[in-house]
Image: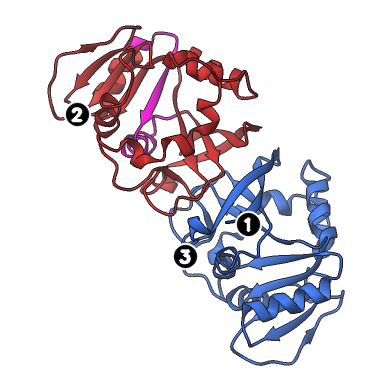
Chain colours: A blue, B red
Amino acid sequence: MSQVFVDVGISLDGYLAGPDRGPQNPMGGVSMQLHEWLFAEKAFRERLGIPGGEEGAAGPLIRRIFDRIGANVMGRNMFDEGEASWPEEAPFGCPVFVVTHRPREPWIRPGGTTFHFVTDGFEAALALARAAAGKKDVRISGGADLVRQALNAGVVEEMTLHVAPLILGRGLRLLDGVEPGKFALRQTDSIEAGGVSHITYDVIGK
Amino acid sequence: MSQVFVDVGISLDGYLAGPDRGPQNPMGGVSMQLHEWLFAEKAFRERLGIPGGEEGAAGPLIRRIFDRIGANVMGRNMFDEGEASWPEEAPFGCPVFVVTHRPREPWIRPGGTTFHFVTDGFEAALALARAAAGKKDVRISGGADLVRQALNAGVVEEMTLHVAPLILGRGLRLLDGVEPGKFALRQTDSIEAGGVSHITYDVIGK
C-alpha cells in the first residue's frame, strides 16, 4: 500500500535550514553540516553522480529511502533553492510536483526527474503525486512549510528525522507551527549511523 | 575521572516542560507524557518508592544514570516545582546544590537526599557539587535555564537527551539561548528503548 512520508535532516535544536536562505544561499549554508553523514555515503553520491564516498553504516538506509519513492511533493522555496544548486541530472529520478503560484511548463531533466508545477494547492499536488507513484510511496520533500502543511492536513503516515549533532540556534525550524492536537507519533525505529540519529515515527491522525 | 553531565527528557520539538508551569503545575503538566517510558520502568519506580513497573529495555540505562551521580546542581524553578511534588524521600539519594537568591538552611530528606541552597551563583554551586561527588559524576539536573547556563559556561562534558515521540508546540525549550559557537557535539550513543530515543553526546568546548 502506497504511503505518504516525510524524510528530512534536522539539527538537534530542530532546524531544517539556517537563516537568510534563498537561491543564492540554499538552506542558509548549513546543508554540508546537517548532511555531512549523507555526503560521506557512496549510496548518496552515486545518486547525485558525485564520485567517491564510503560504503558506511547509513548506506542501506539511504538506498531503502530512494527505492521506495515513486513521486515527490515539494514547496516552492525548496524548488527555487534547488534549481540554483542541483546538478543537471537532478537527484530525484521520478516526478516532482512543486506547489507554487507561478504556472510553468514541466521541466524535464536527464535521469528521470521531471518537475511539474501545480498552481491549485497542496492537496491537488498530492493527488497528482499519488497517481504518479502507483504502488510506490510519495515523499513530502520539504521545505518546512510544506511539511507543516502536510502534517496539519493529516496526510502524512510516516516521518523519519535524521538528527545531526549540531546546534544552529537560528534558521527555519521544522516543527514550528505544527498542530500537536491533530496527530500522535509512535516511534517505530531509532538507529545510530554515521554519528547521527535516524528516528522513524508512525504518524497517527486523531 | 569525575564528569559533569546533563540528562533530560524532551519532546521531539525540544520542550523540557509545558507552558504555565510552577509549583502548582510542575513541568506545565507534561511530566507523565514526556516521562511515560520512565514511569513504566521498575528501575525508576524503585528509586521513587512507587510499587510496580516493568523490567523494560530502558532499565539498565536508568540504573547506570542513577549509579554514576555523586551530586546534583539544580535551578531554583525546578526545586520549587519539585518541593511541591516529590515524595518525602526525594529521589536523589545524594547532595543537591540549588542555585538560588534565597538563603535557606540545608533541607535534609530521608533516603540520603540533602538540598543545599547556594546564593553565590552557578559556578560556586558546581564547585561544591564537584567536591561532594568525589569520584562520581555531577549531574546538571535542570531546569532549562541552568542547563543553558552550564552549556554556555563550557563545563558540561556529556549530554543525554531522551527524546519522546511527542509534539508539545509550546512551553520551555531546552536548547533555546544555547550559544552554538561555544561547543561542538559528537554523538557517542543513540539507542531505542521504551519507544523513546536515548541520545548521548560528548560536549566539546571550542
Give the residue drawn at x 51%, y 53%. Answer: A14
Residue that carries the numbered disc 3 in the rendered image: A19
Q: Position of residue B106 (x, y in %)?
A: 19, 13
User: Left or right: B11 with respect to A126?
Assistant: left
Instruction: Locate residue B200, reporting x and y percent.
Output: 56, 32
Disc 2 and disc 3 in contact, CB within 8 angstroms: no
**Front residue (pair A159, B75):** A159
Q: Secondary structure at mark 3?
A: loop
Screen quadrant of the C terminus of chain B = top left
Q: Which residue is mark 1?
A: A32
Q: Is residue A49 above or below residue A183?
A: below
How packed mark 3 is, by other alpha carbons closer than 10 Å (few <14, some 14-19, many 20 or more), is some
Image depth: mark 1 or mark 3 in front: 3
Dot 3 amino acid type: Pro
Q: Chain of mark 1?
A: A
Residue at horizontal 39 percent and vertical 36 percent from the top: B151
Q: Label 2 neighbourhood size at 10 Å, few (<14), some (14-19), many (20+)?
A: many
Does residue B196 lie above or below B96 as drawn? below
Residue sitting nearer the eye, B12 or A172: B12
Pointer 1 local density, CA inside 10 Å: few below 14, some 14–19, many at least 20: few
Q: Mark 2 and mark 3, same subunit?
A: no
| SS class, disc 2 | loop
Left-right relation of B16 to A102 = left
Q: Where are the magenta residues, as a range? A: B132-156
Separation of residues labelled 2 and 3 (CA atoms): 36 Å
* Subunit of label 3: A
Asked if the residues shown at circle 1 and circle 3 are in contact, with their CB atoms under 8 angstroms apart, the answer is no
Residue displayed at 13% across by 27% down: B102
Q: Which residue is mark 2?
A: B100
Q: Is residue B56 magenta?
A: no
Q: Is residue B124 left or right of residue A52?
A: left
